[in-house]
Image: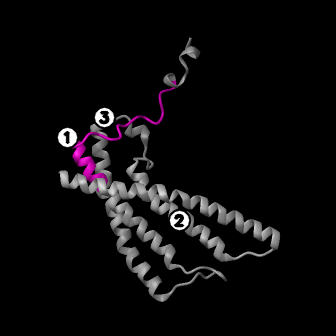
Amino acid sequence: MKPLLGFSRLIDAITERIGKAVSWLILVAVLVSAGNAVIRKMFNMSSNAWLEAQWYLFGAAFMFAAAYTLSQNEHIRIDVVYGMFSRRVQHWIDLFGHVFFLMPFVVLMLYYLVPYVRMSYVSGELSSSAGGLIIWPAKAILLIGFVLLALQGVSEIIKKIAIMTGNMDDPTPYVPAHAPLDDAVAPEARS
């Protein structure tokens, strides 16, 4: 189990670096958007390339941060039901979800995205908008994002098995997102 946990730590480190780095893409996208708006209003000129660059940046931030979000246990789930179970049952639910939902979906996406990106790259596919950008980088962003998500999925499966077999401490003990109403009220307000 130690070599697998080492592999998992390597994946987690890569995912964390990428996840934190791509947060800057949001700032760049906002600057591109603002710059495009200012130029359009002040000089009455614009380009579809700037709009598409903004979409590429937002897409890259979203796709590249998906694996980081998974590593931080921040993907959406139904906490109302999930929170009713013991932590051990929650681990089983997570493992089941990763193995039977996440990984098949990611593998299916990779199966379809590889030829999709390759065909776009080989053909030199361009945007249908006048003055638009080449398309294959946007499609490659999808492919890279799903590769990162697949790797992080493998890491999460390894960690869940290690936690459930006692080979690793739980790094993210579950804390309900919503405290009961009585606990949310300040003690002095209850009197």
The image shows a total of numbered marks equal to 3
**Residue to which mark 1 is pinned:** 166
Label ID, residue 71: none
**Residue 184 versus residue 168 in the image, above or below:** above
Of callouts 1 and 2, the N-terminal one: 2
Disc nearest the viewer among 3 and 1: 1
* Residue at (24, 54) in percent of width and height: 6
* Contact (Cβ within 8 Å) of mark 2 with mark 3: no
The amino acid type of the residue labelled 2 equals Gly
Q: Which residues are magenta?
A: 155-181
Mark 3 neighbour density, 10 Å: few (under 14) some (14–19) many (20 or more): few
Mark 2 neighbour density, 10 Å: few (under 14) some (14–19) many (20 or more): many
Q: Secondary structure at mark 1?
A: loop
**Residue to which mark 3 is pinned:** 86
Between 121 and 26, which is closer to the camera in this rendering? 26
Residue 93 position within the rendered picture, expressed as x and y whole percent measured from the top left: 31, 46
Mark 1 neighbour density, 10 Å: few (under 14) some (14–19) many (20 or more): few
**Quick check: is 164 in the magenta stretch?**
yes
Residue with the most extreme top position: 191
**Residue to which mark 2 is pinned:** 59
User: In the shown orientation, is residue 4 left or right of residue 129?
Assistant: left
* Residue at (22, 46) in percent of width and height: 162
Task: Determine the CA span between mark 3 and mark 1.
Answer: 16 Å
Of callouts 2 and 3, the N-terminal one: 2
Q: Secondary structure at mark 2?
A: helix
Disc nearest the viewer among 2 and 3: 2
**Residue 80 versus residue 5 in the image, above or below:** above
